[in-house]
Amino acid sequence: MARVTLEEWKLADILIVTDGQLAAPAPLICEQLAHAREHLGLRTHGLVIGDRVSEAMTAFCSQTHLFRGGVLTSSPMR
């Protein structure tokens, strides 16, 4: 998370790729993500291989993309 404040990273997004089995983020991480989204314009995308979108993915990601059966679908950006 510290890198998102650096000049060379300011336009970067975060991509999390998972099968959906992802532990819930610590409260501090959720706070840092919320701050970075609001003040730095950070976008976090989750790519789930399969159909198991966990609460953790919802907490981590601005938008979630599902890849299952050769088809990619996306949730609305938040």
Image (tube, rainbow, N blue to C red):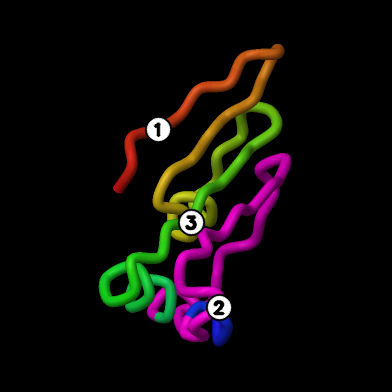
Q: Nearer the viewer, mark 2 or mark 1?
A: 2
Q: Nearer the viewer, mark 3 or mark 1?
A: 3
Query: Mark 2 to mark 3: distance in Å?
Result: 17 Å
User: Which residue is at the far front?
Assistant: 8
Residue 8's mark?
Answer: 2
Residue 44's mark?
Answer: 3
Is 12 magenta? The answer is yes
Label 1 belongs to which residue?
75
Residue occupying image coordinates x 38% and y 75%: 36
Callout 2: SS: helix
- Tell me if mark 2 has few (under 14), some (14-19) or many (20+) residues whose alpha carbon lies within 10 angstroms of its own: few
| Side of 20 where 2 appears, left or right | left
Is 72 magenta? The answer is no
Under mark 2, the amino acid is Glu
Q: Is residue 21 above or below residue 74?
A: below
- Label whose residue precedes the other's in the sequence (2 or 3): 2
Give the percent coordinates (x, y) of residue 64: 49, 40
Residue 47 lies in what quarter of the image?
top right
Query: Mark 3 to mark 1: distance in Å?
Result: 12 Å
Query: Which image quarter is the N terminus in?
Result: bottom right
- Label whose residue precedes the other's in the sequence (2 or 1): 2
Under mark 3, the amino acid is Thr
Give the percent coordinates (x, y) of residue 12: 52, 64
Residue occupying image coordinates x 63% and y 37%: 48
Residue occupying image coordinates x 49% and y 59%: 60
Of 35 and 27, nearer the camera is 35
Query: Mark 2 to mark 1: distance in Å?
Result: 29 Å
Segment colored magenta: 5-31
